[in-house]
């Protein structure tokens, strides 16, 4: 069995693509042992090949299922000697469209993965984190977790929840020696930008963004910021200049932000 052999370790959900995959590559190049977990097993194999033999433990994980979490944690623990330096709760999905056009079942899935999946991860990983000095939890939230985003209402709600959970646990876990940080990306060039109002929709968020000339940051920037979130002191780590600007504006000019958001909502066709 592949083992960490004393290396620091990171457990990554949503590791088959996007921010999770790029973060695995980034940490692995710096000598870390990576746990790769996703429902997309083909994607996991591709990322594992990039990392090379001996540098990872990989397994299928549906973050909504506690039994999957238990099995994944057991395998990771065996590979790392019962340690986990970083839990990266990164798995997430979104649905883009008018609130009433997103099927309730799809809204449920967003909450189940983006919120309940993170909570499940903290419960499952906590024993290993408590056994590891200076352990860290990094939860992927979003700039949509500080600005309510029209046509991303349920997604935005899920990311506000992740940010609130992270802030509460960072305080609560103080005496356990575990820090909890939110990674707060602006729009990053990942498959999540292809979200539609429902699974399989031909109307993609990325099409609207391109038409509007929106700023989209490279996934490499998110991986660098994930490293910062795992090592720095900030409770929120913003990804991209637009994310930094959004945080500033919501703090000092919240009324103006709300006015601008309403003005930019497209008319219903």
Image (cartoon, grey):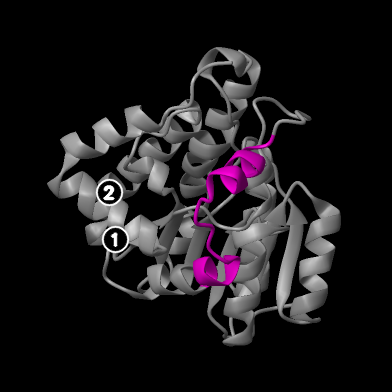
Determine the residue positioned at 33% across, 39% down.
Answer: 147
What residue does disc 1 label? Answer: 176
SS of the residue at dot 2?
A: helix
Which label sits in the foreground, 1 or 2? 2
Residue placed most toward the observer, 53 or 210 = 210
Which residue is farthest left? 252
The answer to whether residue 181 of the structure is visible from this angle is: no
Magenta extent: 204-223
User: Mark 2 highlights which residue?
Assistant: 167
Where in the figure is residue 169, as x and y percent of width and height? 30, 48
Task: Determine the main secondary structure of the stretch shown in magenta.
Answer: helix
Q: Quadrant of residue 5?
A: bottom right
Residue 213: in magenta span: yes
Is residue 122 rendered magenta in the image? no
Circle 1: element type: helix
The earlier-in-sequence mark between 1 and 2 is 2
Q: Is residue 133 left or right of residue 12?
A: left
Considering depth in this image, is 204 or 265 the residue closer to the camera?
Answer: 265
Please state if 136 lies on the left or on the right of 171 as rendered: right
The residue located at (47%, 40%) in the rendering is: 119
Q: Quadrant of residue 195?
A: top right
* Residue 75, percent from left and from top: 70, 61
Quarter of the image that includes the C terminus: top right
């Amino acid at each position: 069995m592949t083992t960490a052999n004393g290396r620091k370790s990171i457990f990554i959900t949503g590791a088959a693509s996007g921010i999770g995959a790029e973060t695995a590559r980034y940490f692995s190049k710096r000598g870390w042992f990576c746990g790769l977990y996703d429902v997309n097993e083909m994607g996991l194999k591709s990322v594992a090949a990039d990392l090379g033999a001996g540098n990872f433990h990989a397994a299928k994980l549906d973050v909504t299922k506690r039994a999957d979490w238990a099995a994944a944690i057991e395998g990771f623990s065996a590979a790392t000697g019962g340690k986990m330096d970083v839990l990266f709760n990164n798995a997430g999905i979104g649905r883009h469209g008018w609130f009433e056009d997103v099927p309730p079942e799809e809204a449920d899935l967003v909450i189940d993965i983006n919120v309940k999946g993170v909570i499940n991860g903290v419960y499952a990983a906590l024993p290993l984190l408590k056994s590891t000095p200076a352990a860290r939890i990094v939860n992927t939230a979003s700039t949509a977790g500080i600005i309510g985003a029209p046509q991303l209402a349920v997604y935005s709600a899920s990311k506000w929840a992740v940010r609130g959970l992270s802030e509460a646990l960072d305080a609560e876990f103080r005496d356990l020696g575990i820090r909890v940080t939110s990674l707060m990306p602006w729009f990053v060039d990942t498959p999540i930008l292809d979200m539609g109002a429902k699974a399989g929709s031909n109307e993609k968020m990325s099409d609207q963004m391109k038409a509007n000339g929106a700023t989209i940051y490279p996934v490499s920037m998110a991986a660098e910021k994930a490293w910062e979130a795992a090592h720095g002191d900030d409770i929120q780590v913003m990804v991209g200049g637009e994310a930094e600007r959004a945080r500033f504006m919501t703090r000092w000019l919240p009324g103006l932000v709300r006015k601008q958001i309403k003005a930019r909502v497209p008319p219903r066709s």
